[in-house]
């Protein structure tokens, strides 16, 4: 009886201006929000629900019918219902034969079930054409129209024609469909909305660890040491002086850690004599989050700039300058200009300004809107050549700042060197190894390896 003409509705793309009816199962938050949006886009919408009573929440131009009745009215049915309730679809299998079922569901945990919800739906209703879509768009975003952040709709499915029909609807709603291939991609698509800044986890945790370490390091050297040895209370250093030590240390160390994995990868490839063997997992993960490491480094560099700008208005600094002036006046003696010091101070500032300028440039070019507008060579030029130049300038900035105190015993409190000395470890390793790697005897074989040459070829010609 119910196996009528709607089951054999042609699945051809809609070429006329009139939109085909779309059925939505479920009158919950997402079903209603999608229904509103579809009616706005000119689609007749029919809801399939356990209760056929309409309420003020349901779009007034939509019909509400039982699941079986609603399904017969459309070739496309959007299942706006949680996976755990999908069993109610089993008795409807005959009505749903040949229809396009759009699975929009998400789970509470990553890889919660052995198979994706869309594959599970395809198993429950084998005669239907299942397409995964819309799960990365929220009901709130659909309703409020603030779709800027989530305009992309990932679509996957085994039936090309069905997928095309869903992508047409996505476009009609003002969204951008991204074809992700067959239904095998559904699990990955279902995991997207559950990920919490996956690429940011390592950079943030590393930064937190380093900030904690350097905070206690500086506290010991700059606050506890003078208190114990000279009975001086410098606890107010916690507000500006110590953060202004930690920020440049973090900026420089993290910037070096952006370039260190590339160097390790080069050494591994040279050692193995091939690029056709996988890198260790940790190195792969490290390389994938280099952009985020660089952006966190830029954030610390920007904070360093801000903290430095307020130095002249600090009470402690003004007190120190005025007491120096008074002591010179009392002694009736002014100190002559130390030309070497003036040179060092100006060079240190100039290197810092140039380094920060290039740092900002690197950050800007890593933004998708900018990187999409440069070709691969331009992108590599900025990120690699200008990146190394930034690292050189920032390392030089630190060396010029404190190089003269390296051997001074006063720099070692309780045998602890100044914190900025520790910040030079990674940048110096990166720059020294990189300068060795650009020697032709190493650079040439590395370039060959990266073009596919192997020291011990796997396949003889
Ligand atoms: P919801 O507000 O709880 O609505 C779910 C609807 O499912 C209910 O209103 C009900 O509709 C129907 N339902 C509940 N139990 C059922 C059962 N035993 N048998 C048949 N139908 C049943 O949930 P939602 O937020 O709209 O989410 C619906 C689906 O969209 C979920 O799979 C979710 O993962 C996905 N999703 C939601 C969002 C979002 O922002 N909310 C975003 C992306 C994806 P009737 O009362 O009309 O039968």
Image: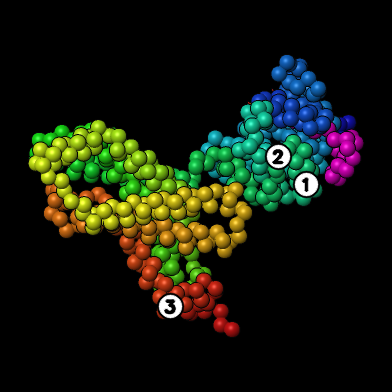
Report if residue 118 is visible in the image: no
Measure the C-alpha gap from mark 3 to mark 2. Answer: 51 Å
Examine the structure image and report whether residue 19 is included in the region drawn in magenta. yes
**Which label belongs to residue 175?**
2
Q: Choose between 283 and 331: the one closer to the eye.
A: 331
**Which label belongs to residue 164?**
1
Quadrant of the drawing holding the N terminus: top right
Measure the C-alpha gap from mark 1 to mark 2. Answer: 14 Å
What is the tally of numbered marks visible in this picture? 3
Please state the horizontal and vertical placement of residue 129, each as a whole percent of the image.
76, 44
> Mark 2: which secondary structure?
loop
In the figure, residue 438 lies in which quadrant? bottom left
Tell me the magenta residue range.
4-26
Q: Choose between 73 and 358: the one closer to the eye.
A: 358
Whether residue 315 sits left or right of residue 228 in the image: it is right
> Mark 1: which secondary structure?
helix
Whether residue 350 sits left or right of residue 235 in the image: it is right
The residue drawn where x is 48% and y is 79% is: 456
Of the numbered discs 3 and 1, the one sitting upstream in the chain is 1
Measure the C-alpha gap from mark 3 to mark 1. Answer: 52 Å
Please state the horizontal and vertical placement of residue 292, each as a whole percent of the image.
47, 48
Q: Which residue is mark 3?
A: 440
**Within 10 angstroms of label 2, few (less than 14), some, or many (20 or more) residues?**
some
Please state the horizontal and vertical placement of residue 278, each as a whole percent of the image.
48, 64
């Amino acid at each position: 009886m119910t196996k009528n003409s709607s089951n054999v509705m042609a699945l051809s793309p809609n070429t006329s201006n009139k939109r085909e009816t779309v059925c939505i199962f479920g009158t919950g938050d997402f079903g209603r929000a999608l229904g509103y949006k579809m009616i706005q886009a000119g689609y007749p919408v029919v809801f399939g629900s356990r209760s056929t009573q309409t309420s003020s929440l349901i779009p007034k131009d939509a019909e509400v019918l039982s699941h079986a009745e609603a399904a017969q009215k459309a070739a496309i049915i959007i299942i706006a219902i949680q996976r755990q309730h999908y069993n109610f679809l089993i008795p409807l299998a005959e009505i749903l034969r040949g229809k396009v079922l759009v699975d929009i569901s998400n789970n509470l945990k990553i890889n919660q079930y052995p198979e994706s919800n869309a594959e599970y739906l395809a198993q429950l209703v084998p005669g239907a054409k299942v397409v995964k879509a819309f799960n990365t768009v929220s009901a709130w975003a659909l309703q409020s129209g603030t779709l800027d952040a989530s305009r992309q709709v990932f679509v996957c499915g085994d039936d090309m024609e069905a997928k095309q029909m869903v992508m047409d609807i996505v476009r009609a709603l003002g969204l951008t469909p991204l074809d992700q291939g067959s239904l095998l991609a559904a699990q990955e698509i279902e995991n997207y909305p559950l990920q919490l800044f996956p690429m940011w986890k390592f950079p943030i945790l590393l930064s937190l660890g380093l900030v904690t370490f350097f905070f206690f390091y500086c506290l010991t050297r700059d606050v506890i040491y003078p208190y114990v040895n000279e009975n001086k209370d410098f606890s107010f250093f916690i507000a500006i002086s110590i953060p202004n030590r930690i920020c440049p240390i973090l900026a420089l160390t993290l910037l070096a850690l952006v370039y260190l994995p590339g160097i390790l990868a080069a050494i591994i490839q040279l050692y193995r004599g091939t690029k056709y063997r996988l890198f260790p997992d940790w190195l792969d993960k490290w390389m994938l989050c280099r952009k985020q490491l660089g952006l966190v480094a830029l954030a610390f560099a920007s904070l360093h700039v801000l903290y430095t700008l307020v130095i002249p208005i600090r009470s402690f600094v003004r007190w120190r300058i005025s007491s120096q002036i008074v002591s010179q006046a009392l002694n009736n003696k002014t100190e002559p200009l130390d030309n070497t010091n003036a040179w060092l101070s100006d060079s240190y500032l100039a290197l810092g300004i140039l380094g920060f300028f290039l740092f900002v440039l690197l950050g800007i070019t890593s933004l998708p809107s900018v990187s999409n507008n440069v070709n691969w060579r331009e992108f590599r030029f900025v990120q690699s050549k200008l990146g190394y130049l930034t690292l050189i300038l920032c390392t030089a900035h630190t060396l010029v700042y404190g190089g003269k105190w390296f051997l001074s015993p006063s720099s070692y409190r309780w045998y602890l060197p100044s914190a900025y000395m520790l910040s030079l470890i990674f940048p110096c390793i990166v720059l020294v190894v990189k300068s060795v790697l650009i020697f032709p005897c190493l650079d040439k074989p590395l370039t060959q390896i990266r073009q596919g040459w192997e020291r011990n070829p796997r396949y003889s010609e």
